[in-house]
Amino acid sequence: MVEHLLAFAGLCVVLAVTPGPDLFIVLRTAIRSGTGPGLTAGAGAALGSVVWAGAAGVGLAALLTRFGAAYTVLRVLGALYLLYLGITALWQSRRRSDTPGHAPAGHVTPWQAGRAGFTSAVLNPKVALFFLAVAPQFVPPDAPVAAMTLLLGGIDAVVAMAWLGVVAVAASRVMRWLARPRVAVWLERVTGLTLTGLGAVTLATTRPPSP
């Protein structure tokens, strides 16, 4: 069993460092509000992963992906949420750029940051597919499926939290080192454009379920 867990952890590391919605949400939060909210955004995303692991373990995720309409609705909701985050970031960066000499405001509380990370992960059907299609390959034949899947979800959450924590700390420290409001504005614009693009692509590639 140990070799299965280590192999899965290695896969989680590769997936964690691959840019995705969670990474950009944590990056934007750390830039705007500092290390604490950035870390809670990462924790929220990690918790969302555990929720999907538990759902896959008891069969809820399989039920969701079996019915195309439910999967499509979840995917559209996730895309709209990313668009909302991206457009909000672009709008706020535009407002702040009109106020010379002031650093970006609009800080979020740790609770708000954690909720954003959690919502992003829960509305991401790719996480459900990961625990349905990939995680079972790391479950030993003689192991209880539900408990083992939840354990794999915990491993994925720990790996994701470690990486997103590094991103949050690094981003907030870099911003303090630069101490340039204009740089913060442009970084927020970049993350806003990225989140908007991810949402638009997800929405454009979502197909209605086959009759």
Image (cartoon, rainbow, N blue to C red):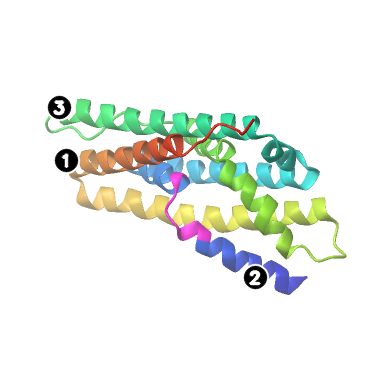
Residue 153 appears in the figure = no
Under circle 1, the secondary element is: helix
Q: Residue furthest bottom?
A: 3
Q: CA distance from mark 3 to mark 1?
A: 10 Å
At a point 27% along the width and 48% down the height, the residue shown is 175
Q: Residue furthest left?
A: 100
Which residue is the site of mark 3?
99
Q: Position of residue 167 (x, y in %)?
A: 41, 54
47 is within the stretch colored magenta: no
Q: Residues within 10 Å of mark 1 (few under 14, many from 20)?
A: some
- Foreground residue, 179 or 28? 28
What amino acid is found at the position of numbered circle 1 in the picture? Arg
Q: Position of residue 129 (x, y in %)?
A: 63, 48
What amino acid is found at the position of numbered circle 2 in the picture? Ala
Which image quarter is the C terminus in? top right
16 is within the stretch colored magenta: yes
- On the rendered structure, is 91 left or right of 26? left
Q: Position of residue 31 (x, y in %)?
A: 32, 43
* Mark closest to the chain's N terminus, 2 or 1: 2
What amino acid is found at the position of numbered circle 3 in the picture? Thr
Which residue is the site of mark 1?
182
Q: Magenta residues, as a range?
A: 15-21
Q: Position of residue 159 (x, y in %)?
A: 57, 59
Under circle 2, the secondary element is: helix
At a point 32% along the width and 37% down the height, the residue shown is 192
Which residue is the site of mark 2?
7
* Mark closest to the chain's N terminus, 2 or 3: 2
